[in-house]
Image: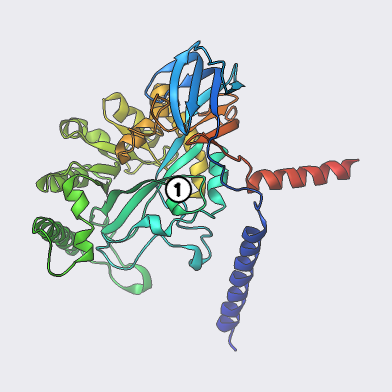
Amino acid sequence: MNAFEKYKNAMKRYIFSLALSATSLICFAQANISPAKKQSKTIAITGATVHVGNGTVIENGTILFGKGKIISVTANGQVPQDDVLRIVATGKHIYPGFIAATTNLGLTEIEAVKATLDFQEIGDFNSHIRSIVAYNTDSKVPATLRSNGILMAQPTPQGGTVSGSSSVVQLDAWNWEDAVIKTDDAMHVTWPVTPRFRGGFGGFGRPQQSPEALAERTQAAIAQLTSFFAEAKAYSEMGKPDVINTRFEAMKKVFAGNEKLFISADSQKDIVAAVNFAKKFGITPVITGADEAYLIIDFLKDNNITLVVKQPHALPNNNDDDVNMPYKNAAVLANAGLNVVLSIDGYWQQRNLPFMAGTVTAWGLDKEKALSTITLNAAKAMGVDKTTGSIEAGKDATFFISAGDALDMRTNKVEQAFIQGRDINLDNLHKQLDKKFSDKYAAEKK
């Protein structure tokens, strides 16, 4: 056996042991965390500062909710004297549940273990893929998010040109049927882009393609995407077909306006091309990524485009961009009057979502508007704003009580959270490990 084969076998043993350890941790941790039971009694929360989510702040507010729905939100409201459970939250803050947009949460568990990754399919045109049926409610990650106020998410498929449909879920459920708020809320497309040409020779000694060849390949991909949409639209208009095409069948709701179209594009050229492409088919898209959206604000406003922008903690996309452009991007766009949603890549990182919104406030966006980027604006982009996204009468009672400012990691302390009126368990593996080792080292000092 040569040195390379020995190295390969050693790595295989290491990866196997890592996967076994991770699996063991998952099997034995958090067994005490079960989804909460349905709300059985009307509840009134009084005395808190209520951040509605639409820019309004109610001091000394009273929230009355029952059967999972908000009955009223008032300032100095009177609490009925009949069978109502009263929670006094004087000096505390109440926020709508934060929403994690365009995430693979629940579709992946351990990045190093392939068997736990279920967010990407083979092929370029996978419109028939539905992330909701792969959503794992037994994941250990959502509990860590709930502790920071993230109570809803949009599990999103990835890969290819047309990745498939996302859905909106709440993060306290036995199975995906219980979790779902809206199935198939958006179809996700990645706009074909030309890789930046760096010249010379690439990996493995093979010369890279010329800029002309790369541009030609991109145009061919755009032509394929256009052809796919044209055929799918024609299919949607033909009534009941003799032969079912599952990929085209899945596009019917997009053309009917019952499902949003999210297109990932970063450069101003690609954003314009993506918007104009969607308009040809009578669709107003949501643009995700949007690094250079600040360069075409008038165009985006004229076309009523919603933007899902990346997290601010990043490097500039171009050499001649301001070094702080990612930090102020959301503020520039929102202050210009655009509907802006803030997102973070990945899944476990989503627990930092409120602090990303807090960063945006430091770079020019009003704090309540920053709150909207992870609550009501997100709900509007996903088409669920009639039922969630803000603390208003008639909507789901999905909100949480924090001891301090929830957008500041120093004061974000979620003390109690409700999802559709259910008082959820805020324990998680992180808290359990913290207590375990705090107890251990405290005992050793004695």
Q: Nearer the viewer, residue 181 or 375?
A: 181
Q: Amino acid at mark 1?
A: Ala
In the rendered image, residue 247, in percent from the top left (x then y), is placed at 22, 63
Residue 322 seen in render: no
Q: Residues within 10 Å of mark 1 (few under 14, many from 20)?
A: some
Identity of the residue furthest to the bottom in this view: 1
Does residue 36 appear left or right of residue 313 in this picture? right
Q: Where's the C terminus, which quadrant? A: top right
Q: Quadrant of residue 89?
A: top right
Q: Is residue 130 above or below residue 147?
A: below
- Placement of 204 over or under 282, stated as above or below: below
Image quadrant where residue 182 sits: top left
Quadrant (top left, top right, bottom left, bottom right) of the N terminus: bottom right
From the image, tell me which residue sits under label 1.
179
Q: Is residue 216 left or right of residue 29?
A: left
Question: In this orientation, which residue lies closer to the viewer: 61 or 44?
Answer: 44
Q: Is residue 159 visible?
A: yes
